[in-house]
Amino acid sequence: MIEKEEQGGVVAKFDNVPCPTVQNLYFIGRNYVEHIEELGNERPTEPLIFTKSLSCVAMSGAKIPYPGHSHSLHFEGEMVFVLREHEDFKKDNAMILAGCGIDFTARDIQSDLKKRGWPWFTAKCFRGSAVLSSKFISIPMDSLPRLAVETWINGEKRQHGLYTKKLFPVPILTEYLSKLVDIGENDVLFTGTPAGVGEVAPGDNIEVRLLVDDEVQIQVQCEVE
């Protein structure tokens, strides 16, 4: 990590690394109270986890095809982390790779599936529904509370979420996951979206930004077509 002086203070600059070759994709739902309330959902007492297939992955700059089975495509901007063994994150001076991503959701399909009590697969898994930043930053675990995420649609800010507002922070999520599965070296974790989700249409430009101390560090961008 490199630091530089700016206007009399020290501004942290973090090493950028390429997005790794993803092995597994884990997603956390309902991790911000305001987002839970805007969709009228129940607050979970433990992490709500779902997955997506690797064929859902698109990288920053991609054009995302509007899913033909849906009439209500929603954006969800999120902080994203690259995982490894949970015990590694307990070590002194532990580091983690942090980036950002977009979890696209077919909201009309999801609403119907929830009413039926069925899994969310067709609402969450489709081409381009998991967009990842091409770069990640290496950041100390104890600096995670300095993170924030923003989503901009066609140049208008629509979401702003602080890491400190998450119901389940990263250490709790990695510990929970590690009790269920063997976490791989390049497994990726989307950690939930803040309030402000909404519909997008063909031609819309979506940009999600990862900030440290209000300074943009990483961006992911895509266009719906």
Image (tube, rainbow, N blue to C red):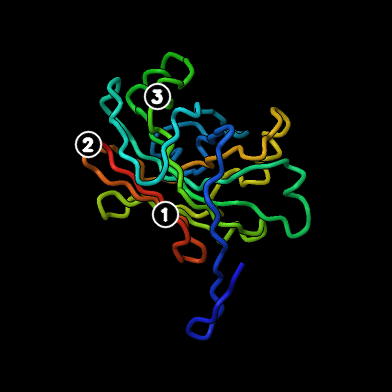
Q: Position of residue 146 (x, y in %)?
A: 56, 61
Check whether the beta carbons of the residues at disc 1 and disc 3 lie within 8 A of each other: no
Q: Which mark is residue 63?
A: none
Please tell me whether mark 2 sits on a helix, a strand or a loop. Answer: loop
List the residue tagged with mark 1.
219
Q: Position of residue 207 (x, y in %)?
A: 35, 50
Residue at point 30% right, 39% down? 63
Tell me the distance, in whole angstroms, between the alpha carbons under discs 1 and 3: 25 Å
Q: Looking at numbered disc 2 in the image, what kind of residue is underneath it?
A: Pro
List the residue tagged with mark 2.
202
Residue density around tag 1, few if under 14, some if 14–19, many if 20 or more, within 10 Å: many
Of callouts 2 and 3, the N-terminal one: 3
Tell me the distance, in whole angstroms, between the alpha carbons under discs 1 and 2: 21 Å
Asked which quadrant contains residue 4, the reply is: bottom right
Residue at point 72% right, 55% down? 94
Q: Is residue 184 above or below residue 216?
A: above
Q: Looking at numbered disc 1 in the image, what kind of residue is underneath it?
A: Gln
List the residue tagged with mark 3.
123
Tell me the distance, in whole angstroms, between the alpha carbons under discs 2 and 3: 18 Å
Q: Position of residue 96 (x, y in %)?
A: 64, 52
Q: Looking at numbered disc 3 in the image, what kind of residue is underneath it?
A: Ala
Please tell me whether mark 3 sits on a helix, a strand or a loop. Answer: helix
Residue at point 60% right, 51% down? 97
Q: Residue furthest bottom?
A: 8
* Residue closest to the eye, 115 or 223: 223
